[in-house]
Structures are given as C-alpha cells and as structure tokens.
Image (cartoon, rainbow, N blue to C red):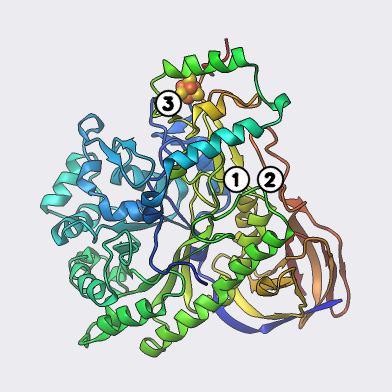
Amino acid sequence: MQEGQRYCRKCLLREMDEAEYFKNMYDYIARLPHEDKVSDEEYERRLSICKGCDYLLQGMCRLCGCYVEMRAVMKVRGCPDIPDRWKA
Amino acid sequence: MAKLLINTERKLSKISKEIYGHFSEHLGRCIYEGIYVGEDSPIENVNGMRTDVVEALKAIKVPVLRWPGGCFADEYHWEDGIGPKEERKTIINTHWGGVVEDNSFGTHEYFELCRQLGCKTYVNGNLGSGTVREMSEWVEYMTFKGVSPMAKLRAENGHEEPWKVDYFGVGNENWGCGGNMTPEYYANEYRRYQTYVRDYSQHSMDPQEHIKPSILKVCCGPNVDDYEWTRGVLETCFRHSEGSPHGFMDGLSLHYYVHPEGWVKKGSATDFDEKVWYKTLSKALYMDELIRRHGAIMDEFDPNKEIAMIVDEWGTWFTVEPGTNPGFLYQQNTIRDALVAGITLNIFNKHSDRVRMANIAQIVNVLQAMLLTEGDKMIKTPTYHIFDMYKCHQDAQLVESWIDTKTIGLEEEYMVPNLTESVSIGEDGKLHITVTNLSVEEASEIDAVIDCRVSSVTGEIVTGEMHEMNTFEDPGRVQLQKFDAVEMNEKGLRFVAPPCSVLHLTVEMA
Ligand code: SF4
C-alpha cells in the first residue's frame, strides 16, 4: 500500500483546504435535483431561524454536524432540535 | 459448486469476545449527541446516556469499549473531566472540528456508560502530552481501593468504590498525533510510563485477583504496514527486560483503515461503481497480510503468543457526507460496509490465536458506525446488523475450515476471492458458520461437508444491491433477514449465497 505510514487522522485536518471544501459544497447544492430542494423563500426562512439559534457554530449546526446552508436546502431534512425549530 | 470443508474435531483457538469490541472518541458526534445527551435532555436517557443507543448496543453484546481516543487521548487531561460539571474546564477540541468540549462526559460518565452496556473497559492514557504523574494518578483514581489521595477524591466526586480497568493504552498513534516519535524513543517512553500504571489489585484481599494482572497494558503498535515500527518497539521493549514478562506489555496495537481512493481523496461512502466495490473489498482483505506479517515479527520476540495483537482502530473511512463538518468524520454506511465488516471479522476469527481484541472505529456517528443519530432519531447501519449476526462467535472455539474460491474482480490490482468464511463452536454448543459473498452479481452454490451429522439448521442474512443503506427517511431498508434456503444432506449442508451477502448458519450437531 502506498499510503503514508505515519499519518493519522489529525494530520489530515491540518492539511485540509477549507475554501475548497465550501466550494465543493456549493457545487453539490447547485447540482441537487430541483424537486429535492425547498423554495427560495423557505430556504431563507430556515436560515434565518438558524441564525438566531444557539446551536449554530461557524455555519454548522452543532446538533447534527451539518452546515446549515446545505441542510436547509433539502426538502427531506428537518431541524434536529426537539421540537423542530423550522416547523412553523 | 464451491466446497466448504469443516473439521469440528480440529479446534484451533478461542475467539476472544473482545474481537467484537468498539471505539468511542471525543470526536464529532460520537460521544456528545450520539451517546451522551445529558440528564436534562428531552431525549430519553438514563444518567445522560441515550436509552435508544444503549439498548441497541446491548443487543449486539458490545464486549469492550475503548475511550477517550484516538488522537484525543494524547491531549486529554483527565482532571478536566471530574467534579461538579459546572466547574469543569471548557476547551476547544482542536483535533476534531474546533467545537467546544465542556468535559461533561469524563471518567465517571465513561464508567457509567460501560456499566449500562455491561462491557469491559479500555481506557487510553495520555503519553504524548501528559506526565507520568498524571497517568499514574488517573490509574490510582480509577482503581485504588483503600485510603489514598486519589481514592479520596473519587469518593468526594460521588464514587466510593473503585472501578475495574480491564485494558489501559499507554499512548495512541505515538508515531503521529501522539508525539511524532521514533520507535525507539516511544518504546523507552512506554517502558517508563507503564511502570507507573500500577496494578492495585495486588493490594486486594481477594486471593483470586492475585492470579492474573488486573490491568492489561497496551503498547502503541504500527500503522498499516510499518513493520519497522513493530520491530523497533519490540526490540527496545525486550532489551534488558529480564524478570518482566513479555516486554512489559500485554497487547500491541495495530491501526488500519480502508479508504478506497487513498489517503487524501478517500472516496464517497454511497456513490461508487463496481470497480470501487472490488477495490474496497480487496483493501479490506489486506488486513490478513498485515496480521500475518506483523504477527511474524511478534513471533520472533514472543513465540508463545502471550502478547495480544489489538487492532484497536479499523474500518472504512470515506469522504464525509456532503455538507457535514469534515472534522466530524460522519459517513453513511451501505451493503459495501457490511461486506467489509463480514470479511474483516472472518479474518480476525481465523487469527484469533494472536488477535485478541479489535475495536471498530467508531461506535456512533463517526466513520464505520453501528448507529447514526439525528436529534431524537436513531438508525442502525448495515454494519450494526453484521455485528449482531457475528456475536455468535464471541468467546467461541474456532474450528478448522476451508472454502473453495475463485478469483473475481475488474482490475488486476484489486482481484479478490469470491467467498470468505469462518466457523466456530459457540458457547451454546452449536456450530456457527459465517460466509461472505463478495461478488456483485453472481450467487454461489456452496456444498458444506461437515465431519459430524447435522440435526437442524437455521440461517440469517444481510444482503441487497451494493448501494443499499438505511436513512432517517427509510430506516429499515437493510435488515437482518431470515435465511432458510438451506438443504441438509448426509454429508452436511447445501445452500446458495446470494451476491453481495453476508450470512450466518447455526447448526445443531447430532
Ligand atoms: S438546524 Fe435547528 S438546531 Fe440546528 S442551527 Fe438550525 S435551528 Fe438550530
């Protein structure tokens, strides 16, 4: 195996390029089938709720580990809090 | 027709139940959210531990749980995680996603979790950035019975009685995140630190406890194929070690992950083609060579196999699910993961004379997890069902078996045998056969020739199209199903293993 012998999980994080990760995420959102996504209004409504939520940490929901800009766009996803904060 | 030969008269080695062990790190949502939600959570819990998760894990008979890391172990200072919760130190977990670690899950909570699971304990100490005194006092805090400063502190924090530490890891990945050490340097440090991992059971009044050391010490072993590390550490640990049995250690660890596209890119957990399927499975099979070659070096120093090989990190490691924190290592789990688990566990069973513990990474929400959670929802992954199926092998007696295979695959470099198997006689006196069929499309008819008369057989199976998985929207797609297409005959059994399947037959012998 040509994999590095003495690399561990921590080393990887240090090497990670964040900007590229977020670009990939936005490309992924753009490629999602239209029917799987919520409307623009619903998307903004969900994000505004996240913005006022204590579980939001640097764009990520601490309860589920998802970046909310990704999670909020998907129809099937809910807010993981109990009760669901996105449910009007 | 493939022949499967089983010789029940030839008993080879005991399959330690700890081979079916697990790993939980302060990483992503493994401990926090996945296991521990706190007593005030709206999610049903007992002393802060999620009831749904504990119940699901009890059902697969988790035998041992490694904690608190991983890389986290070598930066963990145990004193931060004891005492009143509101006074515990809050730190940033710089290793994993930069989230706040409030230390609300610490030593007491870990032992409470193991109590609820009914499992053995495997605590990993901090050699990389901790002191000898810190490690020594932690062991005293956890295990000393009687009057001592640390025992007093434990009692003040609400636990009068000592706990039982079954395994203690002296550092983790010290070739990397645990200090970037050379084998010789680590081995000398290991010798020094482990001296102060005192076995307080020697002070016990119970004569039974004097027979065996109570805490089994685990020395940091190699990553993947780093044979130089294995040899270097053993050489230094065995030098001038007269009077101290087997190089001051009871176990030597090995870490190996399967990432189909390599270390940097890894590859998607759910989006892959047949080429990547075989590539992944061939990388899972590589575990066999790693055990044999590291085992051969261990044999030179320890021919009686007194030191256990402990594969305390293994499993699939894919690119994280899109849109999730890359530091959380959250990935989905498909039929491909079920095959990786079945293949690897068959390999461990077959090497159970040397491999006596393994800990898949990790138990909930991280890497090849058993369970995934989201808020109050929980799903069981295909890998969970394999651990459920294979629990029959825990503490069973491995017996000789051989299966006739053919080589399949799409790329020369990643060809695999179409079948793997392992067979044991369980504590229930029954014969347990586990078989994996690695082929994407071809079923295999198997003729099992057994050296005793079969009086009854039952079966269970995990199978499906290679991408199938359980999701929060569709949690029951991959399940453990009944498998009854088995024919008994005078020589043994005949059955057909479907493509992409892992199956288990329970055989009663006349
Ligand atoms: S998804 Fe829910 S819990 Fe998470 S940040 Fe948004 S509102 Fe808060």
Q: Which residue is drawn at 67% across and 56% down?
A: B336
Mark pair 1, 2: CA separation? 8 Å
Q: Which residue is drawn at 56% across and 39% down?
A: B322
**Labels 3 and 1: the sequence-earlier one:** 3
Q: Is mark 3 on a helix, strand or loop?
A: loop
Observer-side mark, 3 or 1, equals 1
Tell me if label 1 and label 2 are in contact, CB under 8 Å: yes
Judged left or right of residue B145, residue B28 is right
Q: Where is residue B187 in the image (x, y as percent from the top left)?
A: 25, 75
Q: What element carries label 1?
A: loop
- Label 1 CA crowd tier, 10 Å (few <14, some 14–19, many 20+): many
Task: Specify the amino acid type for callout 3.
Answer: Ser
Mark pair 3, 2: CA separation? 29 Å
Looking at the rendered structure, whether the residues under marks 3 and 2 are on a common chain is answered as: yes
Quarter of the image with the C terminus of chain B in it? bottom right
Q: Position of residue B210 (x, y in %)?
A: 27, 72
- Any mark on residue B485, and which? none
The chain under label 2 reads B
- Any mark on residue B469, and which? 2
**Labels 1 and 2: the sequence-earlier one:** 1
Q: Nearer the viewer, residue B502 or B324?
A: B324
Kindly identify which residue carries mark 3.
B41
Q: Nearer the viewer, residue B99 or B211?
A: B99
Q: Is residue B209 above or below residue B463?
A: below
- Label 2 CA crowd tier, 10 Å (few <14, some 14–19, many 20+): many
Q: Nearer the viewer, residue A48 or B47?
A: A48
- Any mark on residue B332, and which? 1
Task: Specify the amino acid type for callout 1.
Answer: Gln
In which quarter of the view is residue B424 placed? Answer: bottom right
In which quarter of the view is residue B29 placed? Answer: top left
Mark pair 3, 1: CA separation? 26 Å
Judged left or right of residue B118, residue B154 is left
